[in-house]
Amino acid sequence: MDDLRLSNLNENPGISPKINELAELAIKADHIDPALYTESGVFRGLRNTNGEGLKVGLTGISEIQGQREENGQLIPTEGRLFYRGYDIFDIVKGIPLESHFGFEECTYLLLFGELPNIDQLKEFSGILSDFRKLPSTFVRDIIMKNPSSDMMNTLAKSVLALFSYDESADDTSLENVLRQCLQLISLSPLLSVYGYQAYRHFHLGKTLVIHNPKPEYSTSENLLHMLRPDMEFSPLEAKLLDLMLILHMEHGGGSNSSFTTHLVTTSGTDTYACISAALASLKGPAHGGATPRVLHMLDDIALHVNDWKDDEEISAYLLKILNGEANDGTGNIYGIGHAVYSLSDPRNVIIRKFVELLSNEKGLTKEFELYRTVERLAPEVISKNRKMYKGVSANLEFYSGFVYSMLNIPEELFTPMFAVARMAGWSAHRLEELCSSTKIIRPAYTNVTPRRSFIPMNER
């Protein structure tokens, strides 16, 4: 059994001191003094000193706004999000609870630039449904073998494995890439849920449950259908998950994973490698890892605050979290603040009322009110105790974990749910890059190591 796993330091006590010694050398060689970025005029993280992202490209897919310029000054404003020029508030308003599911409609919009009519949406949904089929042995040969405890790695592995099943895998013509993207959008729910079911069975000893998707179901309906042992869900549950997918599917083109998609596409690589790179980016806790951290933080607050209606007690505990004296000790109040949005995140504004509806259905009204109180008080605590260059407010991730927990979606699938939605946005960005440019993205770095004369081995 040991031969099936990579060794780690705990299993090799003799090598551990050597690795530590080499790590110290690496730290000495690789640490860059932060002051050198300012001296060299280099914007670390492609962001200037006030946090605004530097422009590295053009996109027609989406746009986010959190401030406006007035007399040379940036003024914080209520957040706005646009998909292909359409305000997200108008999009959601046009897909009410009693109406059709919207993820497929918004996917069409992101990919093709226009809202579909009834016939176009029906045809497009049919294409996605037809593509919602894995190769006959894929589940057995890929997903069930060596299941990982990390669902994002499992998803990336499965996406890469699909290359071997595609006779035109390396074809980067627009038509073929579009076909591949549509298949990945359709298959990512299966890859995510089946990967979790394999983990649940082989790592946790639970009964293995594999449900085939239903062709007549939407993406959100199939996610709940495949995930739940009894395959049952309420209309409100499916609609709220559909809304979560819509709000997560794209965000301005400037996210780490969307930029990764553009970057890797310009190298001429295949779609499966490109999307797996985007998945690797999203897996990082600085990009896609906030949702479970918010959930844990609210659990911690609920445990340590005696009166959930006492603003002073909650504010005092939030200050302890901010000072690194409570929760995980990082000093972060998760789910509060955004790189672009200032006064509000439109996605959070939209989701809040639907979260309230589901919390009422689930009998979790008190928990929802605690979230609302933290959402109201946390920006005040942060503003009073941290130097801010713009406003701060709750972002979409603030309620996401609460939503997923109410939908009985396991924590292991929180970030994969993000990825299932963002697959549409990544696909749109890959297609846009293929249609717009033939040049590879190649950034420049400023070297800070002085020239040195070579020293012969016997003189070192």
Image (tube, rainbow, N blue to C red):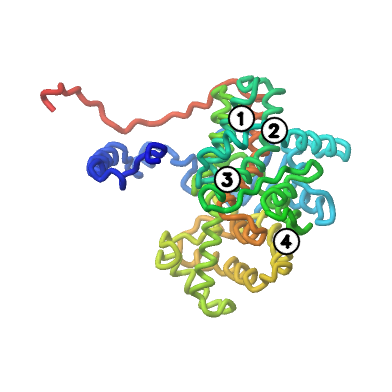
Q: Which residue is mark 3?
A: 198
Viewer-side residue, 147 vs 447: 147
Mark 1 and mark 3 residues within 8 Å of each other at the beta carbon:
no
Marks 3 and 2, the one that precedes in the sequence: 2
Q: Nearer the viewer, mark 3 or mark 2?
A: 3
Q: Nearer the viewer, mark 1 or mark 3?
A: 3
How far apart marks 4 and 1 lie (CA) works out to 36 Å
Disc 1 residue crowd, few under 14, some 14–19, many 20+, Cα 10 Å: some
Q: Amino acid at mark 2?
A: Gln
Instruction: Give the residue displayed 58% in from the left and 33% down from the top.
Output: 141
Secondary structure beneath dot 4 equals helix
Residue 354 is labelled as 4
Marks 4 and 1, the one that precedes in the sequence: 1
Quarter of the view holding residue 59: top right
How far apart marks 3 and 2 lie (CA) works out to 22 Å
Secondary structure beneath dot 3 equals helix
How far apart marks 4 and 2 lie (CA) works out to 30 Å
Residue 44: image x %, image y %?
Answer: 44, 41
Locate the N terminus by quadrant: top left
Q: Which residue is mark 1?
A: 162
How far apart marks 3 and 4 lie (CA) works out to 32 Å
Instruction: Give the residue displayed 86% in from the left and 39% down from the top.
Output: 117
Residue 172: image x %, image y %?
Answer: 64, 21
Q: Amino acid at mark 4?
A: Phe
Instruction: Give the residue displayed 83% in from the left and 39% down from the top.
Output: 121
